[in-house]
Image (spheres, rainbow, N blue to C red):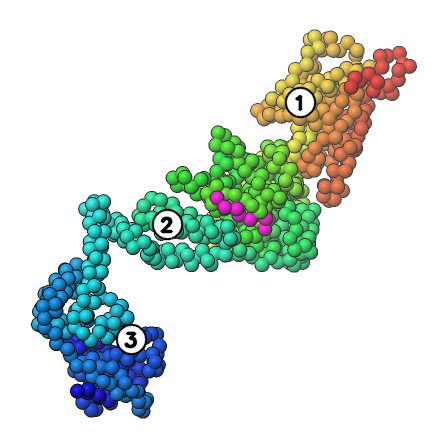
Amino acid sequence: MEVYETLPIVPLRDVVVFPHMMMPFVIGRPSSTRALEHALAKDKRIFLAAQHDASVDDPQPADIYTMGCVANIVQSLKLPDGNIKVLVEGVDRARAIEWKEDKGFYRVVVKMLPRQRETNEDVEATMGRVVSLFEQYVKLSNNLHYDAMIAAVRVDDAGKLADTISAHLVVGVDEKQNLLEIISPLERLNRIAGILEIEVDKLQVDRRIQSRVKKQMEKAQKEYYLNEKMKAIQKELGRKDEKGNEVDELRKKIEQAKMPKDVEEKAVQELKRLEAMPPMSAEATVSRNYLDWLIAVPWHKKTRESRDLKRAEQILHEDHYGLDKLKDRILEFLAVRALVKKPKATILTFAGPPGVGKTSLAKSIARAMNRKFVRLSLGGVRDEAEVRGHRRTYIGAFPGQIIQMMKKAGTLNPVFLLDEVDKMSMDFRGDPSAALLEVLDPEQNHAFLDHYLDVEFDLSNVMFICTANVLHTVPQALRDRMEVLPLAGYTEQEKIEIAKRFLAPKAIAGTGLTTENVSVPDETLQAIIQRYTREAGVRNLEREISSICRKVARKVVVEGRGFKETVTPERLSDYLGVPRFRSTIAEEKNEVGIATGLAWTEVGGELLVTEATLMSGKGRLTLTGKLGDVMQESAQAAMSYVRSKAEEYGIPRNFARQTDVHIHVPEGAIPKDGPSAGITLATALVSALTRVPTRRDVAMTGEITLRGKVLPIGGVKEKVLAAHRAGLKTIILPKDNEKDLADIPKNVLDVLDIYMVETMDEVLKTALAGPLPTLRPASEDAGVRPPIGDDTITH
């Protein structure tokens, strides 16, 4: 007899309810809630069927399996969020025949499927086999309670046994629905037996994996065991499991870094290697560090560059006084960048003595362009790996300083200062200056290869600025890539302005004073510059001003905040002690055998006093003062020239056989070299031999030839500024150096008398305090031996 019943239906997600099964679940959908309320109002019977697709929120009849289970509602509880928790007990299988829509829910006409009872030898044998397999399944599974499950399957009814086991199998919804739709208990038991065999095999594989891993691990290595187990599972199942949050986070960072395609491929490849490694292994740490560096380096981020020339000019003037030519060159550079989208990179190099503002000028350029600023000091760097990095095969390897500074900048286009580029050296570990060739070459640095990263990095957007005190220690190949902008030093007036605008306010603020407590007039600053500092830059000047401020600060603490001090030149010795330098050389009297030369040093120009004296002897020439080979040869050339012109200058012809000459350059501990002292040596010799004094207010520099020609020299600006600082008013320079006067500030040129000379005769006319004993033009018709002429020089 067929039985039909009309019941409200509740579709279930991912759940299949079997007869004889108690099942709790939560109802939240409005249609399901109305169906439940309808059932509770009548006989508490409801039809439960699974959805084909659990993601469908409003299932239609076609979305629901027709085979389901009629269940009794045992208990229901309304939750605070409006959902209803229900406990049901499955009664019988039923198949939906007809659907009826009723006030927001469905009612279905179901055909009840009566339970079939089979009792024969096949059924009993199958039941025994299924119970045995289920016992093995429960023993191997960690999810089921052994005693409770064994008690539940001790039944004589084949159908009830099949449904009870089906309800507790950990298989998919489709598989459970298939079991629900099989009416015959024997057929259902056979199907369950096949499923149990597969599941038992899976669990035994898991046990084998655990056993295999335990043999490989030590007792104390619990974490290692878990990782090895994961590897073994992946190997057995033939698939990979996702790593934890760290790998996902690294993958997300790689995507966000917007790396070039080849770099991203390398990063993803490294990430896959990291996934397969045990987290605590040393190789994993190396791999993780490498990925961190790849992610941290800026691959696409740029700072928006300011191209406002007026603002840039204002910033340069705010930060530095003077240096007009240098500022003009920088503004020209910025103007080109404003007109050209991708201009050819230029490597600016500021060369000059310490303390003239090379590093601070680079900072001002970064501020004027609105770019990030990073500084790398190359002083004392001897290892090529400092620039290019170490290969990852070495323990503790890191990228080179170039990549580290780019990470610190965080952008692709910073202003990158390579400080003290002339102080690099080399040893067996390589030559860092050779590694810099690639960095500073605009044709190559778009593909800079760091040994650690081992991928190409684009440095073409970086503005490189180098600083150096001297250029002769910079390799020629590196110097060829630089545009050198010399900073010779400041004039006295420029130093006074710098002290007023920058140094004094900084020193006053740094010592906690105010302008009410201390004032330093211009004449005091001038006295400090003349008597306590003699330098191209302003570092010592800053120290002296700070020293004054500290002493005033002490008085303010003792006498109260109302104390005020005006530092006058007369009181400087109270603050700074005895003057270290004489204010001027021009005040001293003229002397025989002494000439003032000009020399170039790494810290600017210096005066080079040269002495010559005569003794009875056999014509020997002695040179002292730690003179280099070139300078000694200049002295010999000067001596030969004087001997050739002896009669013309009123010097006895036989002096070379009866007189020894000693030439000394004071400050004998300091090495001296170069040809530019030639005319100074010759002037000192002529003065000593003729007994005509030299003018002490005259300084000179120039190379001498055997014919008495004066050749050009270098470092004119530094030498002229040194003479100006020392108070000398007359300077003798080679005629060919006239072009270099354009670099000297106008206010300095206005107070100097500069003589441009071509021959030694012109030098002596200006340098000697009086006429020579016999001053007559050289002539081959005269009765004396003619001087060496141009036709006697062998080329």
Disc 2 versus disc 1: distance between alpha carbons? 64 Å
**Residue 20 position within the rendered picture, expressed as x and y whole percent measured from the top left:** 15, 77
Percent of width and height locating residue 90: 18, 79
Quadrant of the snapshot with the C terminus: top right
Dividing the image into 4 quarters, which one contains the N terminus?
bottom left
| Labelled disc at residue 274 | 2
Give the image location of residue 225, x and y in percent.
Answer: 24, 49
SS for dot 2: helix
- Relative depth, front residue between 617 and 155: 155
Please give the name of the residue rendered at 40% of the width and 38% of the height, measured from the top-left corner: 394
In the rendered image, the residue lying farthest to the front is 121
Residue ID at (63%, 19%) = 624
Secondary structure beneath disc 1? helix
Residue at the spot of label 1: 630
Q: Identify the main secondary structure in magenta.
A: loop
N-terminal of the pair, mark 2 or mark 3, is 3
In magenta, the rendered stretch is: 454-461
Q: Give the residue type at disc 3.
A: Arg
Which label's residue is closer to the chain start, 2 or 1?
2
Amino acid at circle 2: Leu
Mark 3, residue position: 13
Q: Residue 386's x, y, as percent?
A: 48, 39
Question: Relative to 322, does residue 784 appear above or below in the rendering?
Answer: above
* Residue 456 covered by magenta stretch: yes
Q: Measure the C-alpha gap from mark 2 to mark 3.
A: 38 Å
Q: Is residue 402 magenta?
A: no
